Amino acid sequence: MSITKEAELIGMKKASEAVALTLRKMKDFAQPGITTKQLDEFGAQILRDLGARSAPYLTYGFPGFTCISVNNEFCHGIPSHKKILQEGDLINIDVSAELDGFWSDNGNSFVLGKDIHQHQKLVNASKEILHKAISNIKGGVRISDIGHLIETEARKRGYKVIRNLTGHGIGRSLHEAPSEIANYRDKNNLARFKKSSVVAIETFISTSSTYAETLSDGWTMVGNNGGFMAQHEHTIVVTEGMPIILTEMNGVWN
């Protein structure tokens, strides 16, 4: 969507604060021994208390209220009573929701407890790259140039990017134009970021895979060459200068 009046910005801020707060509290609640279903139900209650509705559940009938992916799962992990979190797990939580007609999206990958499997370096790379990407976005910048920046920064650190997972426009629905904000230079994408537009910027930084494939459950995605992936995501408003980071209170950069 494009912000055309103050009421729309207020609405987007309110929806974004709801998903950001939910994500932050879910990360703090996560601990070894609980299930991903328990973590999802915790997040679902926060959304309900804030008057927000789960976007993946509303839009796609996703079998959960948030996406929780663990270790080799890259994204869209289904919350389950059978999946018990353990010390050192690489966890990704993606929270998106609708509130009063406005939609917002954010995500965070983190290591649970001690970094016994050495995932923190990957997590840090994804956070740093997202920060740099967002810092370079303003009206008129080519979307493909930001993709090039993300991939270049990933390669500098010895990582790859997932080419079939992208950021996207958002605001009045979960996915809007621009439909693909890729993590690499897409030479066919000549579009530019537009001032006042609302977009969800995501990093998909991988140790060994370049594509994500869907498992037989129809939702969970893993790497075509295995390995691990870290994802971080903010919903922002594009301006003539530094973007407005609507989901900044999720604590990803703390």
Image (spheres, grey):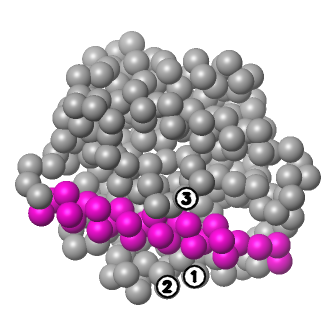
Please rate how many residues cluster around mark 1, counting C-alpha atoms within 10 Å: few if below 14, some from 14 to 19, many from 20: some
Q: Residue at x 46, y 61 (%)?
A: 249
**Which residue is under mark 3?**
251
Residue 228's disc number? none
Give the answer, above or below, for where 53 lies relative to 95: below
Q: Residue at x 77, y 45 (%)?
A: 120
The amino acid type found where label 2 is placed reads Gln
Q: Is residue 103 visible?
A: yes
The amino acid type found where label 1 is placed reads Glu
Predominant secondary structure in magenta? helix
Q: CA distance from mark 1 to mark 2?
A: 6 Å
Q: Nearer the viewer, residue 123 or 243?
A: 243
Give the answer, above or below, for where 106 lies relative to 36: above
Question: Tag 3, which secondary structure?
Answer: loop
Q: Residue at x 33, y 36 (%)?
A: 242
Q: Point out the tag, 3 or 2, that comes first from the N-terminus.
A: 2
Q: Point out the tag, 1 or 3, that comes first from the N-terminus.
A: 1
Question: Tag 2, which secondary structure?
Answer: helix
Report the quarter where the C terminus lies.
Answer: bottom right
Residue 41's disc number? 1
Q: Are marks 1 and 2 in contact (CB under 8 Å)?
A: yes
Q: Answer with left or right where residue 218 lies relative to residue 38.
A: left
Q: CA distance from mark 3 to mark 2?
A: 20 Å
Please identify, in this view, whether the residue under mark 1 or under mark 3 is nearer the observer: 3
Question: Tag 1, which secondary structure?
Answer: helix
Residue 45's disc number? 2
Q: Is residue 214 visible?
A: no
Please rate how many residues cluster around mark 2, counting C-alpha atoms within 10 Å: few if below 14, some from 14 to 19, many from 20: some
The amino acid type found where label 3 is placed reads Gly
Residue range corresponding to the magenta coloring: 7-33
